[in-house]
Amino acid sequence: MAKKIAKHSTEKLHHTKLANLYPDLFFFREEPTPYALIERLMQEWRTEWLPKPRSLRIRQFFNEKGISSKYLYQWVEKYPEVKETYDFVLDALADKRDIGATLKDGELNGEQVRHTFWRYEQGEKDFIAWKAGLTKKEEGAGQGNIMVVLEQFPESRLVPKKKVDE
């Protein structure tokens, strides 16, 4: 941690909270990561980077900043504020991709809606879960393929022997 030398023995020392070190991918040297930098990155990630039309992947922002996504995931584990921002950006990017795929040439793409509808409607989720449960019940019943063997019936008035063409 970086320390400021006190002028008087009664003056409180100010500490800069360091998160950790990360290797800068552009200059290949380790940089200290003050928590204030992480807060600034989270703010920029949400407000400036996310609205851009070419913002499509969760790690893209950090790659552009020269920070390995490994450190993003460490920060997500360590800091609840980073986790909150991460979840928000993840959902926003998913919405952006869904809207882009659903509105094809300005028209509603029904096929895409059919495949993604369950994410938004609880009734559709419940129906899919119910349907999956039926499949499990059928598999659990021990009924696989059933083979029925019919023996040849003897000739009768109703079923005469077939004539063979010569």
Image: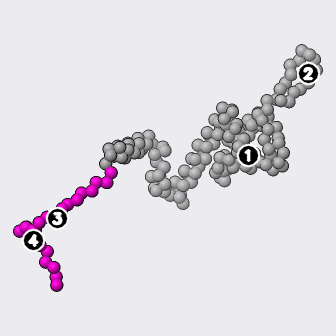
Q: Do residues under tags 1 and 3 come within 8 Å of each other at their CB atoms?
A: no
For the residue pair 97 and 153, the one nearer the viewer reads as 153
Q: What residue is pinned by disc 4?
A: 160
In which quadrant of the rendered view does residue 8 lie?
top right
Q: Amino acid at mark 3?
A: Gln
Q: Which mark is residue 6?
A: 2
Colouring scheme, one of rainbow, by chain, secondary structure, one colour: one colour
Q: Is residue 158 magenta?
A: yes
- Disc 4 or disc 1, which is closer to the eye? 4
Magenta residues (range): 144-166
Mark 1 secondary-structure assignment: loop
Q: CA distance from mark 4 to mark 3?
A: 13 Å
For badge 2, the amino acid type reads Ala
Q: Nearer the viewer, mark 2 or mark 1?
A: 1
Q: Residue furthest right?
A: 7
Q: Residue furthest left?
A: 157
Secondary element at tag 3: loop
Q: Are marks 4 and 1 in contact (CB under 8 Å)?
A: no
Q: CA distance from mark 4 to mark 2?
A: 114 Å
Q: Quadrant of residue 128?
A: top left
Label located before the other in sequence (4 or 2): 2
For this view, does 27 lie left or right of residue 160? right
Q: Is residue 6 left or right of residue 44?
A: right
Residue ID for mark 1 = 68
Residue 49 numbered tag? none
